[in-house]
Image (cartoon, rainbow, N blue to C red):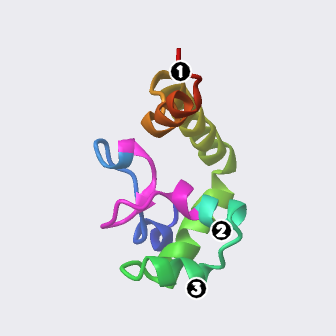
Amino acid sequence: MTAVISEHINIAPGVCGGKPHIAGHRIKVQDIVIWHEDMGMEPDEILYHYPSITLADVYAALTYYHDNRQEIRRQIREDEAFVRQMQAQTPSLLQEKLKNRNAPNN
């Protein structure tokens, strides 16, 4: 990691699950990537929603991603798999109520 990026990106055990994140914040590099690439947000839009970070932070996160694309994409896939697993294990209370509401009375 270059000195400029290390001013903006941190990796510390116990912070954000040890994943790369914006220094001094709990915003992970993978969050920036998802907002930018998957949701189509421009860097200035990300700043609008998260004004506590800087434009340099956003670009450093994107630079880190492009330098470590496989690692970040693997982390995103692992997190998505975890979410799917939790959703399967924890049914939605609202969906259960709606299902019971529409069930015929016996």
Look at label 3 and name its amino acid. Answer: Asp
Residue labelled with disc 2: 36
Say above or below: 85 vs 31: above
Measured in 3D between alpha carbons, the distance from the residue under mark 3 to the one under mark 2, in whole angstroms, is 10 Å
N-terminal-most mark, 1 or 3: 3
Q: Observer-nearest residue: 56 or 2?
A: 56
Residue labelled with disc 1: 105
Say above or below: 81 vs 31: above
Task: Give the class, few, some or many, for how many residues have Cα within 10 Å of label 2's Cα (few <14, many ≥20).
Answer: some
Task: Give the class, few, some or many, for how many residues have Cα within 10 Å of label 3's Cα (few <14, many ≥20).
Answer: few
Label 1 secondary element: loop
Q: Observer-nearest residue: 31 or 66?
A: 31
Say above or below: 15 vs 100: below
Q: How many marks?
A: 3
**What residue lies at 46% left-to-right and 69% top-to-bottom?**
3
Residue labelled with disc 3: 44
N-terminal-most mark, 1 or 2: 2
**Region of the chain picked out in magenta, as a range:** 17-32
Task: Give the class, few, some or many, for how many residues have Cα within 10 Å of label 1's Cα (few <14, many ≥20).
Answer: few
